[in-house]
Image (cartoon, helix red, strand yellow):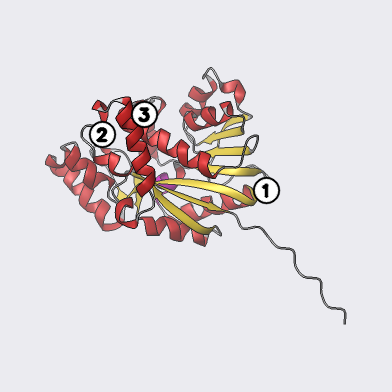
Amino acid sequence: MSVLPEAELHYSAGLENTRLQSAIGRLEFLRSISIINRFAPSSPARILDLGGGTGPYAFHLSKLGYEVDLVDAMPLHIQQAKEHGDAGRLRHIAVGDARSLTYADSSFDVVLLMGPLYHLTEREDRLVALSEVHRVLRPGGLVVASVISRFASLLDGFVRGLIVDPMFEQIVRQDLKDGQHRNSSGHPDYFTSAKFHKASELADEMTEAGFADPLILGIEGFGSVMPILEDLGEADFVKLLEFLELVESEPEMIGVSSHLMGVSTKPNVKPSAPANPS
């Protein structure tokens, strides 16, 4: 099991099944899908949704004609995915550990890593998971990896007024210090044990695992700090999506996003040149 006990307790309430239905959750989902669609090969390609929770991305992509496997460390999430009306669209749904995949080398065209990198709080474990993704990807295959921004609690604390709680303030100070998010209060709004990344950290980890020139993008961007997000009409929401894409890779803007996304490929392995005859 790749989930820490406190994280397992956090997710045991089953809230992940509806998390993306809020205004900010919808923004996260639509922006993530937009980025995936932009870089992924045409269907029918084979996709592994690793750490995909209850399957929102897996089910969406399966409807677009992709062949999708869903793996998550939480048995509850996998059970909820299997009870979904579209469960039959997926190739495989299973509990699994991102650090030890059961798939053969070069099995997938795309791997989505939308949660494990922030629940693996030790860098060594994250590198193992990224190396496993590298192994199961075909040469030239795409990896799309999401993390939580180092500054997410700081911004959320002031936008939502959580900073007035001295315990939350201490959480923010720890996050800013080393990105190791810890919630000893048990308050569900304060999340659970996780690693919060700087953009440069995500790029370094992906590079060390063998991925080429990772592109780091802000997912929700400045939408993360918009107090009027829930009141936006559909036309303004579409305009927001347009402008978020325009600034998604601007270094000055990335840190304001609650989630960051790293996009890269597994380099094609060139055949070795034949040995010169002696």
Q: Camera-side residue: 221 or 163?
A: 221
Q: Is residue 99 visible?
A: no
Amino acid on which the number 2 mark rests in the picture: Asp
Residue under numbered circle 2: 189
In the visual, does 161 lie left or right of 22? left
Residue 153 within the magenta-colored segment of the rendering: no
The disc, 1 or 2, on the residue closer to the chain's N-terminal end is: 1
In the rendered view, would you say 278 is above or below 73?
A: below
Q: Residue at x 34, y 42 (%)?
A: 243
Which of the two marks, 3 or 2, is nearer to us in this view? 3
Q: Which residues are magenta?
A: 117-121
Residue 80 rendering spot, x and y as whole percentages = 48, 23
Residues at marks 3 and 2, CA–CA distance in whole angstroms: 12 Å
The disc, 3 or 2, on the residue closer to the chain's N-terminal end is: 3
Residue under numbered circle 3: 19
Residue 156 rendering spot, x and y as whole percentages = 23, 41
Q: Which mark is residue 106?
A: 1
Q: Determine the image quadrant of residue 31.
A: top left
